[in-house]
Each structure stands twice: as structure tokens, then as C-alpha cells.
């Protein structure tokens, strides 16, 4: 029998989550499938989301793969070109190119356009830095860049876009939205602003293209609203099994660093899943009794441990996650035995809860899944 860990991918869930996005907007949908489809597999995600109007990703090779597989939708390179040789490939495969920095405009200026495959014409998305200060031109630069692009011999269509830093936070999007709309009012070009959070919360920011990512994979972008409440279905379930149990006496310790010590006799299960599978090593342990003040320190989630399902029932992790295994509390689960099914996240165990306990976000957990975990669809 193979090692029992696996990631089940429910591709119908992706399709259904795309419909949730569709019902929430009349804008066109650019499905974000970067980072190997947020860990779900690029081609798998693309196929499940085939009803989308566009795909957004980073690597030009991935974009070419999609075109060669027959996808005819808009394919946007979210960070644009990294080198000048990519421009003729973009034209040949009819890809859409983000421009976020002056060095990319310089490459564009040196690009001959005509004489290259596909007539050499390029569709451009111009990125505006509306306050996140990651990529994009600040508002004062936009008029000049737009002028340059509109006069460029090889530029066909231009879309103005921005990305919000706080669409999922209480602070919201008011400031960057006003700033972006004031700029965009000068041009009759399509606009794109909204990630999942803005799509779900701010219809006034839908523009012509929305760019959902995380919601398509069935996770909530909000800390205070669950995926279920939003009508989203988890696409990825990471599961494994208990491969051993241990009977602890009071005072017995568990795992590397003896991070957990039993206060009383109890039973624990050893699960075939560790950080080499992508489970976060910093996921906090359940309660430990310090030998002396300061001996053991709680991890950011405190002593409550990280939630996990055994035989469909919630319990918590204990001790430090190791490379291939982790520990679960079986005190309240007398029926759990070697072979019991464990759900690390997904069906019945919201990935957001696991992420919150581990001091991270669902995005990171999905993307961190490693290649040794078999994918079942
Ligand atoms: C430019 C851009 N647009 C859209 C998205 C999708 O965001 P989310 O997954 O929060 O919907 C991302 C993801 O980080 C992004 O970088």
C-alpha cells in the first residue's frame, strides 16, 4: 500500500466557484491561475475553469502551453515581460502583456513590431500603483505612459488596471478606487481592479474585467466570512491516515523539542503528513505545561493547537510537525485507530481555519503542497 497521503481535487468545485463569481458580476472574468493554479495544477485549473473569459498567470511558457492546448480566451501575463525576446512570442501567441515599469516600456520601444509573427501587435494592460507600492506607475506618470503607449506602432488595445492592498480588510478600497477612477476617467479604455475580495464586496469596483483567484479554489478571502457563507466549495482536500498510536503517561513528551508534554494519561495518533508534504511546520502545538516559566513558548496561535479532522471529528495537532509526520490528540476519539482517515484541510475542515491557526493564509497552504503528494481527481 502506498503512503496514505493524497490531495483530492474536486474540479466541479472550481467550475461551481466560477459560477459564484459569474453571478456576482456582469464584468468579464480573468481567472487567476498563477502559481500552478494556486497549487491545483495549471492545466487542471484551466480545464475546470474553461467557462472563464481569460486566464492570468506569470510564466510565458505556461501561457504558450495554454494556447497550444487550444484555449482561445485572453491570456494575461500578470508581470509582463522579463526580457525583450518574449515580446515576439507574446505577439505570436496572441498573449496580453502587463506593463508595470519603465524598463518594460524601454523594451517595447526597441521592439520592431511588424515583421514579427502575428503581425507583431500587442495588447497591453497598464498597471497603476494606487497605493500598494508593489508594481505599477504612480498616478503622476500615467498620462505620459498612456500617451507613449497610444502612439506606439506595435500596441493594439490598452486596459488600465490596478490591484488593491486592502480589499479583504476593514480599511477597504475607498482611497485607491477614487484615485484610479479619477485617472481612468481621462481615457476610453477598459478597466480592471477587483481581486476575489473586491469582486465579492465592492460591485462599484468591478470595472470591465474582474480578476478572482482564491475564491475560485473555494477559500474565503475574508477573515470573518467563511467560504460556505459565500457559497464557495473547497476544491482541494488534503487527507492522510493515522499510521501509529501511542499511549502517553502523565509527563510523557512528544516530538522534536518536546514541545508537548501530557498532563495526564492520554492517547495520540501519528499522521502520515509533514512539512515535506507542505503542511506548515509552524502550525502550533496543543497545550504544553512549562517545566519552569519560559521553558516552552507558545507559537502565534497560542496553545489551542491546529484544528484537524480524524474520522470526521475535530481534534487538534500536538507537538512539532516533523518532515513526514505530525501528531494528533485522540483523547476524545476512542474509536480512532491505525488507518483512521485524517483531513488536514478541505472537505469538513476549512483551509482558512488551519491557515489562521498556523499564522498564515489559505493561499500559502495551497501553493505549498509538494510534488510528492499524489493528486487524485
Ligand atoms: C494582480 C492580481 N490580480 C488578482 C489576483 C487574485 O487575487 P485573489 O486570489 O485574492 O482573488 C492576484 C493575486 O495575488 C494578483 O496579484
Image (cartoon, rainbow, N blue to C red):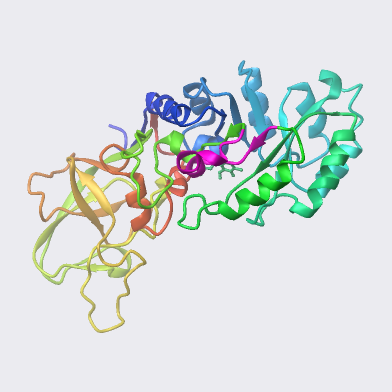
Left or right side of 223 for 368: right
Q: Residue at x 85, y 24 (%)?
A: 120
Left or right side of 269 for 230: right
Regarding residue 240, the answer to whether it shows in the image is yes
Q: Which residues are magenta?
A: 190-207
**Nearer to me, 141 or 305:** 141
Instruction: Estimate the x, y position of residue 316 in percent, counting from the top left.
Output: 23, 55
Q: How many marks?
A: 0
In the image, residue 320 sits, relative to residue 106, either above or below, namely below
Instruction: Estimate the x, y position of residue 125 in percent, counting from the top left.
Output: 72, 36
Regarding residue 5, the answer to whether it shows in the image is no
Task: Report the quarter where the C terminus lies.
Answer: top left
Q: Is residue 267 magenta?
A: no
Task: Report the quarter where the N terminus lies.
Answer: top left
Q: Residue at x 64, y 56 (%)?
A: 131
Q: Is residue 195 magenta?
A: yes
Amino acid at each position: 500500500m502506498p503512503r496514505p497521503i493524497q490531495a483530492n481535487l474536486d474540479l466541479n468545485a472550481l467550475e461551481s466557484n466560477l459560477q459564484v463569481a459569474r453571478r456576482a458580476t456582469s464584468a468579464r472574468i480573468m481567472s487567476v491561475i498563477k502559481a500552478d493554479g494556486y497549487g491545483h495544477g495549471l492545466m487542471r485549473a484551466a480545464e475546470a475553469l474553461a467557462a472563464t473569459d481569460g486566464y492570468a498567470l506569470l510564466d510565458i511558457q505556461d501561457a504558450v502551453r495554454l494556447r497550444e492546448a487550444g484555449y482561445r480566451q485572453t491570456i494575461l501575463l500578470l508581470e509582463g515581460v522579463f526580457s525583450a525576446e518574449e515580446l515576439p512570442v507574446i505577439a505570436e501567441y496572441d498573449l496580453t502583456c502587463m506593463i508595470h515599469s519603465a524598463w518594460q516600456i524601454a523594451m517595447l520601444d526597441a521592439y520592431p513590431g511588424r515583421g514579427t509573427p502575428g503581425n507583431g501587435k500587442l495588447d497591453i494592460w497598464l498597471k497603476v500603483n494606487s497605493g500598494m507600492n508593489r508594481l505599477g506607475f504612480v498616478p503622476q506618470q500615467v498620462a505620459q505612459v498612456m500617451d507613449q503607449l497610444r502612439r506606439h506602432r506595435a500596441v493594439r488595445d490598452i486596459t488600465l488596471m490596478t490591484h488593491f492592498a486592502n480589499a479583504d480588510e476593514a480599511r477597504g478600497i475607498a482611497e485607491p478606487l477614487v484615485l484610479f477612477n479619477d485617472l481612468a476617467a481621462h481615457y476610453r479604455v477598459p478597466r480592471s481592479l477587483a481581486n476575489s475580495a473586491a469582486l465579492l464586496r465592492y460591485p462599484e469596483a468591478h470595472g470591465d474585467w474582474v480578476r478572482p483567484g482564491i475564491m475560485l479554489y473555494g477559500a474565503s478571502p475574508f477573515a470573518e466570512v467563511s467560504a460556505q457563507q459565500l457559497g464557495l466549495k473547497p476544491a482541494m482536500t488534503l487527507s492522510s491516515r493515522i499510521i501509529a498510536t501511542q499511549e502517553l503517561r502523565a509527563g510523557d513528551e512528544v516530538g522534536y523539542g518536546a514541545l508537548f508534554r501530557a498532563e495526564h494519561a492520554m492517547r495520540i495518533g501519528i499522521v502520515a503528513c509533514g512539512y515535506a508534504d507542505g503542511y506548515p511546520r509552524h502550525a502550533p502545538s496543543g497545550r504544553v505545561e512549562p517545566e519552569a516559566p519560559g521553558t516552552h513558548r507558545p507559537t502565534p496561535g497560542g496553545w489551542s493547537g491546529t484544528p484537524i479532522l480524524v474520522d470526521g471529528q475535530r481534534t487538534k495537532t500536538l507537538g512539532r510537525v516533523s518532515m513526514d509526520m505530525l501528531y494528533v490528540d485522540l483523547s476524545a476519539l476512542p474509536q480512532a485507530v491505525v488507518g483512521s482517515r485524517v483531513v488536514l484541510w478541505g472537505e469538513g475542515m476549512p483551509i482558512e481555519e488551519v491557515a489562521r491557526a498556523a499564522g498564515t493564509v489559505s493561499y500559502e497552504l495551497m501553493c505549498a503542497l509538494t510534488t510528492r503528494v499524489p493528486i487524485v481527481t
